[in-house]
Image: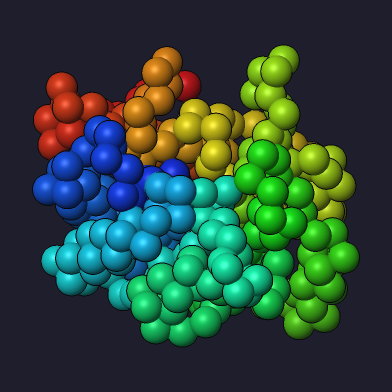
Amino acid sequence: MTTTLLHISDPHFGDPNGVLSRQEVNQVLETLLVKTGPDVFVVLSGDISFRGQAQGYVEAKQALLDVFDETKVQRDRVIVCPGNHDIVKSATNGSPFEAFDAWSVGLRRDKHCTFSSDSCRRFTSPEVDFLLINSVYHGDSKYGLVDLKKMDAVLADMNAVPIQNLPRVAVLHHHVVPFSAGDTSTTRNAYQVLTRLAKHGFSLVLHGHQHALLELGIGENSMKVHGVGSFRYITPGFINGATVYRIDSSKHVTAEHYAISKDAPNLLKAIHDF
C-alpha cells in the first residue's frame, strides 16, 4: 500500500498582498488533489492566517471546504499544526492558540489537531502514525522551540502502543536546520528533536516557516526532512509551492515538488531538478 501526503504551508490567508486570488487558490488546490486522489492526507504546517486575523481563518476554512467538497477529500484527512502567525494573544490571558484551535475544530469536526492544552499530539490513522508538534508553544513568534518533555511522553506512548508497519511522520512549523548565517528563527533545540525522531524510526519530518524548498536525509535509515515553499505569500527570491509525498510499503519516501506560478498551465509547474 502506498500512502500519499500533500504538504502545503504558510498560506497566510487574510494577507491583503497574497499572490493568489481566492479563485486561484481553489484552482491550485483542486489541481493538486486531482493528482493525488481523495485518499490523500493534506498537511498544513502552520501560518494559516496572516498575523492571526479572524478573517484569515474564515477564508482558510471556506477555501479548503470548497475544494474538499469538489474533490471528495474527507475533512479528517487534513493534518494541521500552528505557526508563529497563529499566535493570538487575548485580552483575557487565554491560550494564544484558541483561534487556531477553533479553526481546526471547525474544519476537521474534532479536537485531534488542537494545541491549547497539548504542545505535542499523536494522531493515528490506518495508514500513518503522525506526531504533531507545536513549535511555538512558548508563545514567542521570533523562533521555534519544542517541548521535549511532552514530546518524550508522546513518543513513549507511540512505543508502548505501536502500530505495526505504519510509517511515522512528524509535522511542525519551524525548520530544524539554519537556512543562512543570520537565521535565528530556527527550532532552538532541533538537535534533540531530530535525534529523537531518528531513534524512533520516523520516515518523514515536514515543516514550513522558511518559505523555501528544503530537503535533507538524516540517520541510518535516511529520515527525510522536508520544508516547502509558502503557498500564497510574497517571498522575494523564493518560490511558492507544494509537495506531494508517497510512502510505499517499505517506508521509502518519494517527493514530487511543484512550483506555483502564474506563468504555468493550471498555475503549477513540476520541479524536477532539485
Q: x, y (%) of residue 273?
A: 42, 18
Q: Is residue 196 above or below residue 67?
A: above
Image location (x, y in percent) of residue 173:
59, 48
Identity of the residue drawn at 39% across and 56% down: 53
- Which residue is situated farthest in the front direction here? 91
Q: Residue at x 58, y 61 (%)?
A: 89
Query: Residue placed at 40% from the left, 18% from the top?
Result: 236
Horizontal side, residue 64 vs residue 87: left or right = left
Who is closer to the viewer here, 201 or 249? 201
**Can residue 37 be seen here?**
no
What's the image's color scheme? rainbow
Q: Looking at the picture, does residue 64 appear above or below residue 157?
A: above
What residue sits 79% from the left and 64% below the top?
151
- Give the number of callouts: 0
In the image, residue 160 lies at what x, y percent?
82, 80
Identify whether 152 is placed above or below 219.
below
Where's residue 3, x and y in %? 45, 61
Q: Nearer the viewer, residue 61 or 250?
A: 61
**The image quarter in which residue 114 lies:** bottom right
Q: Nearer the viewer, residue 190 or 87?
A: 87
- Residue 69 in sight: yes
